[in-house]
């Protein structure tokens, strides 16, 4: 999960490498780092200045692939958990602070099973 340590410049290089060099400035001007990528989806991309729907879908898919998370199921029951463990972990890691910095995926899984 090296992407969690990516700087804004690293994210800009990544968005260029997946075929969207025209959006490098959108990501850098909005200070999108590796930790903030978990929040990048079709809902948030227009706030970054990306409004082409096809591009939004493709970028969201690339982010999910990078993070190795599944696409949200829109038809799931409200009684079901909203996200898998990996997504919960990445959401926690998207924040900053001493407790977050020391959190590992294995630790999260251990706490869940207790």
Image (tube, grey):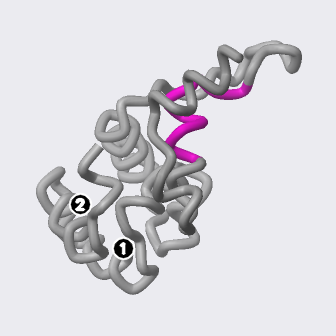
Q: Main secondary structure of the magenta part?
A: helix
Q: How many marks?
A: 2
Query: Which residue is at a point 54% across and 65% down the rendered structure image?
Result: 98
Secondary element under disc 1, as helix, strand or loop, is helix
Give the side of residue 97 with respect to residue 58, left or right: right
Decide: marks 2, 1 in contact (CB < 8 A)?
yes
The mark found on residue 15 in the picture is 2
Q: In the displayed structure, would residue 7 be above or below residue 108?
A: below
Q: In the displayed structure, would residue 92 be above or below residue 47?
A: above
Query: Which residue is at a point 15% across and 67% down the rendered structure image?
Result: 13
Residue 24 colored in magenta in the image: no
* Quarter occupied by the N terminus: top left
Which stretch appears magenta?
Answer: 82-91
Q: Nearer the viewer, residue 82 or 15?
A: 82
**In the displayed image of the protein, which residue is found farthest to the left?**
17
Q: At which x and y percent is residue 89?
A: 54, 38
* Quarter occupied by the C terminus: top right
The mark found on residue 27 in the picture is 1
Secondary element under disc 2, as helix, strand or loop, is helix
How packed is label 1: few (under 14 Cα within 10 Å), some, or many (20 or more)?
many
**In the displayed image of the protein, which residue is found farthest to the bottom?**
29
Q: Nearer the viewer, residue 41 or 11?
A: 11
Determine the image quadrant of residue 26: bottom left
Q: At which x and y percent is residue 55?
A: 36, 52
Determine the image quadrant of residue 11: bottom left
Q: State how far apart marks 2 and 1 are (Cα).
A: 8 Å
């Amino acid at each position: 999960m090296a992407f969690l340590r990516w700087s804004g410049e690293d994210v800009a290089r990544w968005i260029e490498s997946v075929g969207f060099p025209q959006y490098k400035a959108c990501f850098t001007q909005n200070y999108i780092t590796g930790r903030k990528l978990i929040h990048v989806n079709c809902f948030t991309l227009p706030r970054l200045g990306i409004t082409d729907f096809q591009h939004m879908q493709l970028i969201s898919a690339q982010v999910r692939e990078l993070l190795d998370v599944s696409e949200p199921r829109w038809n799931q029951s409200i009684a079901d958990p909203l996200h898998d463990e990996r997504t919960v972990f990445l959401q926690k890691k998207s924040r900053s602070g001493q407790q977050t910095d020391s959190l590992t995926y294995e630790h999260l899984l251990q706490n869940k099973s207790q």
